[in-house]
Amino acid sequence: MQSTSSIDQFPTPLDSLNKVAYQAFQQSKSYFGVAHKTISTRLTELFARTSERQTQSLSPEGLQKLQQRLNQVLELDWQDAQRGVYPQSLLFDNPWQDFFRYYPIVWLDMPSMWERDREKRYQDFSPEIDTEGYPSYYLQNFHHQTNGYLSDLSANLYDLQVELLFGGTADVMRRRILAPLKQGLSAFDSTPAKQIRVLDAACGTGRSLRLIRAALPKASLFGTDLSPAYLRKANQLLSENAGELPQLIQANAEKLPFLDNFFHALSCVFTFHELPAAARQQVIEEAFRVTKPAGVFVICDSIQANDSPELMPMMENFPITFHEPYYKHYISDDLVARLEKAGFENISTENHFVSKYWVAHKPA
Ligand SMILES: C[S@@+](CC[C@H](N)C(=O)[O-])C[C@H]1O[C@@H](n2cnc3c(N)ncnc32)[C@H](O)[C@@H]1O
């Protein structure tokens, strides 16, 4: 899939062919996601939803806006690959084996999710799951996941569920952290590539680390997460890649086991909306502590209320459908103010499709 043309040159016939293949690939994922969501939503309404929890539909303007944003993010994803931010092959990276193995289990797990949803059991863990030592805000069945983040089954289904939720754009949105990370690392141009240290905090199953590895083949990568099951899954995923394995450590992002000023860059993807306000602030303070002066911190999470009023019904539906107890506060939380409070400066924000990005720098 790799081609030698750059964005400044005319596209080669191979580029054009690859672009069509990429668009077709994304479109098929999008159709599959819509079909899955339509059927699963109908069934959920039938078996779990009560009248007090009705969801709203997007207006025609909202739907149009969503389609526009989808087209924009796919074009940007293609362009960033052309620009060499990451290899073009990354655009076609898909965990097929997991898809065939776990997609049937996504359906098989649904009746128990409906039951918990119907009975409003949101902190429901099997007796064999060790819940000791975790912050209480974490012991939730986020997305109605069986055993929350604390089982291997949950770790095996997670990526697939996120991919279905976003209609095949989960990695497309994760990849938007790569350009600002690389841009931020340009402050350390004189540091040998192997000595650059990058942490993905709350790395989950390691998808962002896989993308970061492709964009920064030589850097020393680190991942932390509270869930041992998700770290096991991340280890499995990241072991598929040639090159140095990222170091994975079980840790609370509020209290990282690293020295001050240790990392040149940090990322945190799709996690802030699952933290209560105080924990959000603490994670930012901790990110500031472990980032080197002149280092960069990139957050990726859901869009917020003030980003796109047309998409507000979607933001209101999300916590109802997926049990996201901290989301409502998150969508109106001012993360720029939180980043500034911690000491970050030169903070910018971007929106891509249904995600928002904060790029913050530690003073040099
Ligand atoms: C929605 S998932 C996002 C995972 C991953 N970053 C991604 O892009 O898919 C949230 C992740 O944050 C982790 N998590 C939540 N609170 C945490 C905390 N305080 N410290 C470390 N990890 C945390 C969860 O275990 C889970 O893996």
Image (cartoon, rainbow, N blue to C red):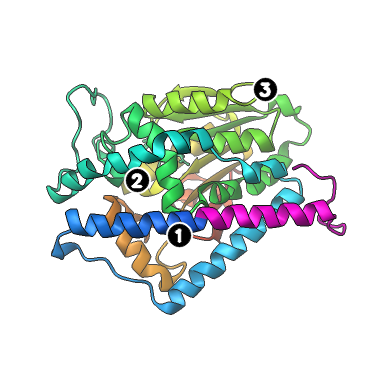
Callout 3 environment at 10 Å: few (<14), some (14 to 19), or many (20+)? Answer: few
- The residue range painted magenta reads 1-29
Q: Nearer the viewer, residue 114 or 141?
A: 114
**Between discs 1 and 2, the one toward the N terminus:** 2
Q: Tell me the residue at 69%/25% (across/down).
A: 195
**Between discs 3 and 2, the one toward the N terminus:** 3
Location of mark 3 (residue) = 243
Q: For disc 1, does the CB lie below 8 Å from ligand 1?
A: no
In the displayed orientation, state which residue is furthest to the left.
Answer: 119
Q: Position of residue 16 (x, y in %)?
A: 77, 57
Q: Nearer the viewer, residue 336 or 40?
A: 40
Element type where label 2 sits in the image: helix
Magenta span contains residue 16: yes
Q: Position of residue 334 (x, y in %)?
A: 42, 58
**Mark 3 or mark 2, which is nearer to you?**
3
**35 relative to 294 in the view: left or right:** left
Q: For disc 2, does the CB lie below 8 Å from ligand 1?
A: yes
- Residue type indicated by callout 1: Ile
Element type where label 1 sits in the image: loop
Location of mark 2 (residue) = 274
Q: Position of residue 321 (x, y in %)?
A: 28, 55
Q: Which mark is residue 38?
A: none
**Between discs 3 and 1, the one toward the N terminus:** 3
Q: Quadrant of ligand 1?
A: top left
- CA gap, disc 1 and disc 2: 14 Å
Which quarter of the rendering shows the C terminus?
top right
Q: Which mark is residue 303?
A: 1
| Residue 11 can be seen in this image | yes
Q: Nearer the viewer, residue 279 or 79?
A: 79
- Residue type indicated by callout 3: Gly
